[in-house]
């Protein structure tokens, strides 16, 4: 009878963080289908049961990755956001922060926007969306109160603007557009979104 291999020693000060880091690397390089808790345990150098202390199953791992992504995006947008700026440069700074994150983390962003998640993570996901996409909506709603943006549902207006940004990010991640060029045109994009295509 072949003896069972001994479990490798646990050397990580924060196993959860190490697993998430390894999982994001796998997601980026091989896609979501290649993620498994057993494989992550092997790559991290712990027993195959160790990840179960932090993630009950693969979906829990995916949810944790998505929430970490929302946290990073929110921090990037918080850093870029300056409420003292006039509307157009204020939106441009937020848009540029979003595009930078989206183009550099395309696989993670797709996971963040996936609708499938554990019901237990629903509230956390909603909070993540509010901290990121919600930032645009609050700026637009505030601009409506100031008479700088047309009347209408701010959530719908944010959806329209977000679709334009996400479309550019997707085309950039797919190699159709150059990231530097896209970031350079962000101001023009926001100008068009604010003022439309009709000559004035």
Image (cartoon, grey):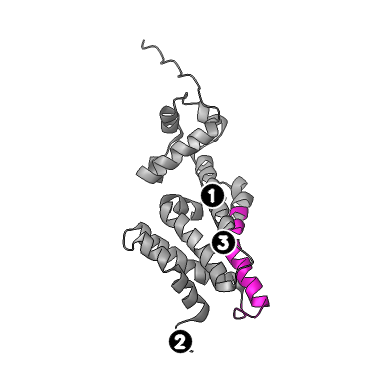
Relative vertical location of residue 41 with respect to residue 172 in this rendering, above or below: above
Residue reaching furthest to the left? 176
Asked whether residue 146 is drawn in magenta, I would say yes
Query: Which x, y percent locates residue 111?
Result: 47, 51
Query: Which x, y percent locates residue 28?
Result: 39, 45
- Asked if the residue under mark 2 is in contact with the one under mark 1, i.e. CB atoms within 8 Å, the reply is no
Q: Residue at x 34, y 58 (%)?
A: 174
Q: Main secondary structure of the magenta part?
A: helix
Q: Which residue is mark 3?
A: 133
Q: Which residue is mark 1?
A: 72
Which numbered disc, 1 or 3, marks the residue closer to the eye? 1
Which of 128 and 39 lies nearest the eye of the viewer?
128
**Mark 3 or mark 1, which is nearer the start of the sequence?**
1
Q: Secondary structure at mark 1?
A: helix
Q: Quadrant of the N terminus?
A: top left
Q: Residue at x 50, y 22 (%)?
A: 10
Q: Residue at x 36, y 64 (%)?
A: 181
Q: Tell me the CA gap for discs 1 and 2.
A: 37 Å
Query: Which x, y percent locates residue 52?
Result: 53, 31
């Amino acid at each position: 009878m072949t003896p069972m291999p001994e479990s490798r020693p646990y050397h990580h000060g924060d196993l959860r963080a190490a697993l998430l880091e390894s999982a994001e690397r796998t997601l980026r390089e091989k896609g979501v289908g290649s993620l498994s808790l057993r494989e992550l345990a092997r790559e991290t150098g712990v027993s195959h049961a160790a990840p179960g202390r932090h993630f009950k199953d693969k979906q829990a791992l995916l949810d944790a990755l998505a929430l970490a992504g929302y946290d990073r995006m929110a921090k990037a947008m918080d850093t870029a956001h300056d409420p003292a700026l006039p509307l157009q440069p204020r939106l441009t700074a937020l848009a540029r922060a979003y595009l930078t994150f989206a183009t550099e983390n395309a696989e993670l962003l797709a996971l963040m926007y996936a609708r499938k998640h554990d019901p237990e993570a629903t509230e956390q996901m909603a909070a993540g969306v509010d901290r990121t996409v919600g930032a645009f909506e609050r700026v637009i709603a505030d601009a409506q109160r100031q008479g700088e943006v047309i009347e209408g549902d701010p959530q719908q207006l944010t959806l329209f603007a977000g679709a334009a940004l996400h479309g550019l990010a997707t085309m950039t991640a797919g190699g159709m557009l150059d990231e530097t060029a896209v970031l350079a045109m962000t101001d023009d994009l926001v100008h068009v979104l604010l003022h439309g295509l009709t000559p004035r």
